[in-house]
Amino acid sequence: ILVALMWGGPRDYSLIQKLAKFSSLEQLEDTRIVKTRRGIVRGNRLRKREEIIDRPLLDADDFPAHAFPFVDANRLPRNTDSLIDSNDSTSWEAFESPQLLLKLSWLSADKRFHARIVRPRNGLGVICSQSYVSVHFEPQALPQMDGACLVYNSKLATYYMLLTSSHLATF
């Protein structure tokens, strides 16, 4: 409440209350409609995972510029490194198609967050670095995936985070 009122007013607080009534990715995960995880952590590189070899890999600081709002797995390099951090998750469900990738930080150049829907390669989703979160949607939730991508790329997402997160409010 304090952050919303610090950066906005009663109308902004009312908007936040109304938006909070919609399903969040966290709520969809609780109902097993989506699976999420942060990208691969290379870290100490003590665990070998052969199943990530030859998967499309998004390891860049930002999404490729082509084909917004999609990432084409066929245009990404293939992963050739099987080593990950010994404490990294070994659950790969969140990297399966249908898949949405979320950039963890906002880009100051356009002052917004970024998300992309993955166009899979032979049915395989993309693995990504720890700069991203991967979200696998069950097939019946494709409209929610499209909506999440639209909202996450909008200035509304930045505005919402500004009004609800004390971390973003300090930038």
Image (cartoon, rainbow, N blue to C red):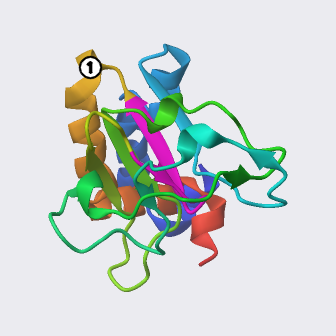
Please name the residue that numbered disc 1 is placed on: 139
- Residue nearest the observer in this picture, 163 or 73: 73
Mark 1: amino acid? Pro
- As drawn, the residue found furthest toward the bottom would be 109
Q: Which residues are magenta?
A: 126-136
Q: Is residue 18 magenta?
A: no
Please say whether residue 136 is visible from this viewpoint. yes
Q: Position of residue 150 (x, y in %)?
A: 22, 50
Category of crowding for the residue at label 1, using alpha-carbon neighbours closer than 10 angstroms: few (below 14), some (14–19), many (at least 20): few
Q: Position of residue 132 (x, y in %)?
A: 51, 57
Please say whether residue 72 is visible from this viewpoint. no
Q: Is residue 135 magenta?
A: yes
Q: Quadrant of residue 44?
A: bottom right
Looking at the magenta stretch, what is its main secondary structure? strand
- Residue nearest the observer in this picture, 83 or 149: 83
Q: Position of residue 114 (x, y in %)?
A: 36, 62
What residue lies at 71% left-to-right and 59% top-to-bottom?
42
What residue lies at 48% left-to-right and 75% top-to-bottom?
61
